[in-house]
Image: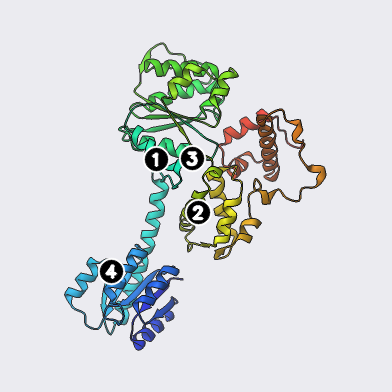
Amino acid sequence: MAKILIIDDERSIRSTLREILEYEDYEVEDVDNGIDGLELIRKNDYDLVLCDIKMNRMDGMEVLTEGLYIKPDLPFIMISGHGTVETAVEASKKGAFDFISKPPDLNRLLITVRNALDRGSLVSEAKVLKRRVSKVRPILGGSQAILKIKETIERVAPTDARVLITGANGSGKELVARWLHEKSNRSGAPLIEVNCAAIPSELIESELFGHEKGSFTSAIKQRIGKFESANGGTLFLDEIGDMSPPTQAKVLRALQENKITRVGGEKEIEVDVRVVAATNKDLLKEIEAGNFRMDLYHRLSVILIHVPSLTDRKDDIGLLTQSFLDEICNDYGMPVKKISEAAMDALKSLPWTGNIRELRNMVERLIILSDKIITDADVKAFANPSSSTGITNVPAGQQTDYDQFANFQEYKDFAEREYIKFKLEKNNWNVSKTADDIDIQRSHLYSKIEKFGLKRGE
């Protein structure tokens, strides 16, 4: 049901308009002055405003200007008993949807209201669709670390310098890579992404460099690799730390010579590609362990950008949460829910092990399960399993013996295995559903199942 606000200092006009609009099943509120009207616009979500032009305390044109400043997409229909062509033109220039003279003609009023509401719906839908298809979301945050990242992007993006982005899963490494491409001179060419952890080691070379027909059993036709597909643009190698040593050697050669050779082929193909890589691993430790090539590390890390975890930038949680509230509520076609200060403090106190991705999932859950105002009680009730509120009251016999782990990596593997096992069992071992549930690619989940030796019914 559309919600309409009437602002008019004549009681008879307000009563008449309310009666007409409520008869048409609209939800109507009215007020007799512009100052109170603007306050209601700030506090509530209206689909349309009917506003008189000549009023005491505040002129209708001022209300129009201020109202559109507060809610830029809110349709205004201006009404006046002293209507002239000049007044109508001025109202249109200031952003009014239409102008109606008093006393309003019933049919003209209802048609104008219907058209204004339809336009408002189209504007909202267009914004949602534009956001869904837009190439890059903004990097949100005002913390010192985020401001430094934005400054680095501005300096580095116009160059062809290779960039290595480090940071925990879900912290926003991919977003940084997208902005590096978007602000570069290559933005007109494609940004090609490769998740090195999601592709089996025996297929990664074919994925990156392509292959010739008949080069191996399933190579029934020639395939163009990601390096060729990204020619003239940017190649984003995500989770580069999981790349196999043989593939690392071939990537190093491609970076040194700007040439690649397809699997099973002999011809060298020149490529003009800017490589941006990302990893959640400490590559220097991987080099010490013999898992990563030092020469490749130096080739990739001309510029280093570290994306901090959400727990290191908790001052940004408020801005991120409000952005997610607006975005998700608009996607669901519902009024934007409010969040109390206590609830925001509760969110800031949680240990965000899943970083921004976890926060967004949490906000979506709160939107679905909470009332109009999200409270701290809602946050505690619907907190993620990884949060402190989600792991309380564990029976003593089920407490984890932390002494059994020789190092942090062993504990991480243990926790990851238990979490994936729990999710698989919860979804009755439906791998596709579980992959969607924990927000990773299905192929990546299969790799994890194989890595941890998980079996159904164990």
Q: Quadrant of the C terminus?
A: top right
User: Counting residues from the N terminus, which is met first, the one under dot 3 or under dot 1?
Assistant: 1
Pointer 2 residue: 318
Point out which mark residue 150 bears.
1
243 shown above or below 123: above
The residue drawn where x is 49% and y is 55% is 328
User: Counting residues from the N terminus, which is met first, the one under dot 4 or under dot 2?
Assistant: 4
Camera-side mark, 4 or 2 = 2
Task: Evaluate if marks 1 and 4 touch, with contact meaning CB atoms under 8 Å apart.
Answer: no
Query: Is residue 44 at all visible to an observer of this figure?
Result: no
Corner quadrant of residue 422: top right
Task: Evaluate if marks 4 and 3 touch, with contact meaning CB atoms under 8 Å apart.
Answer: no
The answer for how far apart the CA atoms under marks 1 and 4 are is: 37 Å
Circle 2 — which element?
A: helix
Pointer 4 residue: 96
The answer for how far apart the CA atoms under marks 3 and 1 are is: 13 Å
Circle 4 — which element?
A: loop
Camera-side mark, 4 or 3 = 3
The answer for how far apart the CA atoms under marks 4 and 3 are is: 40 Å
Corner quadrant of residue 427: top right
Q: Position of residue 183 (x, y in %)?
A: 33, 37
The answer for how far apart the CA atoms under marks 3 and 2 are is: 17 Å
The answer for how far apart the CA atoms under marks 2 and 1 are is: 19 Å
The residue drawn where x is 55% and y is 54% is 364
Tell me the crowding category of disc 1: few under 14, some 14 to 19, or many 20 or more residues within 10 angstroms, Cα based.
some
In-front residue for pair 399/256: 399
Q: Position of residue 96 (x, y in %)?
A: 28, 69
User: Counting residues from the N terminus, which is met first, the one under dot 3 or under dot 2?
Assistant: 3
